[in-house]
């Protein structure tokens, strides 16, 4: 059974369909090329991490990412990829090493500092580390943007709704409202 944007599309027997047909039904159109080749010349270094060390997990790690390129990290559990990303994002402290953003050395000791440098972290397990599933979409967005929506000693509801609605529209979240409980969203 295929649902798209919260609406029933069709039900088919597995042996009477193909993966290509199911994907087309899910996205609402035929996909000509799953991974189109795009010629691109990467730009300047945007993020550079030099000789990062953290306990016995991260040992002298160095990498950089340039404008226009996607840099990926993979490896077995315990290889240090998660720890490295959390360290660069300021979620976990590093023992030594340097982080540069657009050529400028940055001291990142918190997630707030990383965000102010334009660094974001997409958790590998959004259900346990990236979302509060029993809260609504509004609360999940607000909790990561408190400085933008605070007014005096509390949250400005007007700023909160404006900010959160703009983010929902910008990233094209399919939701009936900001009051939708996150665990009830499709996750697709």
Image (cartoon, rainbow, N blue to C red):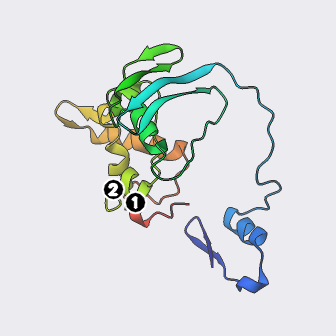
Q: Where does the image place residue 93, in percent across and percent down from the top left?
A: 32, 32
Q: Nearer the viewer, residue 55 or 124?
A: 55
Which dot, 2 or 1, sits closer to the camera?
2
Mark 1, residues whose alpha carbon is within 10 Å: few (<14), some, or many (≥20)? many
Element under disc 2: loop
Q: Nearer the viewer, residue 93 or 125?
A: 93
Q: Residue furthest left?
A: 153
Location of residue 92 with respect to 105 vertically, above or below:
below
Left or right of 118 in this view: 44:
right
Location of residue 169 with respect to 27 vertically, above or below:
above
Element under disc 1: helix
Quarter occupied by the N terminus: bottom right
Quarter occupied by the C terminus: bottom right
Q: CA distance from mark 2 to mark 1?
A: 7 Å
Please indicate, yes or no, whether residue 48 appears anywhere in the rendered image.
yes
The number of numbered badges drawn on the structure is 2
- The residue carrying mark 1 is 182
Location of residue 146 with respect to 48 vertically, above or below:
below
Location of residue 72 with respect to 26 vertically, above or below:
above
Left or right of 128 in this view: 185:
right
Q: Where does the image place residue 175, in percent across and percent down from the top left?
A: 48, 58
Q: Where does the image place residue 2, in percent across and percent down from the top left?
A: 63, 74
Q: Nearer the viewer, residue 143 or 128?
A: 128
Quadrant in the rendering for residue 57: top left
Q: Residue furthest right?
A: 32
The residue lying at 46 percent from left, 36 percent from top is 120
Q: Do labels 2 and 1 touch, CB within 8 Å?
A: yes
- The residue carrying mark 2 is 132
The residue lying at 76 percent from left, 54 percent from top is 34
Please indicate, yes or no, whether residue 180 appears anywhere in the rendered image.
no
Mark 2, residues whose alpha carbon is within 10 Å: few (<14), some, or many (≥20)? some
């Amino acid at each position: 059974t295929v649902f798209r944007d919260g609406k029933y599309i069709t039900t088919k027997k597995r042996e009477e369909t193909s993966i290509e047909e199911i994907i087309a039904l899910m996205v609402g159109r035929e996909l000509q090329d799953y991974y189109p080749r795009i010629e691109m010349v990467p730009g300047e270094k945007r993020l550079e991490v030099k000789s990062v060390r953290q306990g016995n997990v991260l040992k002298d790690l160095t990498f950089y990412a340039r404008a226009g390129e996607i840099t990926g990290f993979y490896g077995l559990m315990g290889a240090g990829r998660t720890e490295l990303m959390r360290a660069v994002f300021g979620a976990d402290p590093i023992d030594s090493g340097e982080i540069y953003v657009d050529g400028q050395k940055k001291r990142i000791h918190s997630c707030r500092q990383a965000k102010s440098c334009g660094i974001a972290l997409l958790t590998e397990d959004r259900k346990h580390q990236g979302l509060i599933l029993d809260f609504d979409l509004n609360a999940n967005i607000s909790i990561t943007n408190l400085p933008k929506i605070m007014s005096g000693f509390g949250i400005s509801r007007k700023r909160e709704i404006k900010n959160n609605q703009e983010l929902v529209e910008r990233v094209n979240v399919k939701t009936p409202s900001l009051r939708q409980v996150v665990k009830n969203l499709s996750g697709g």
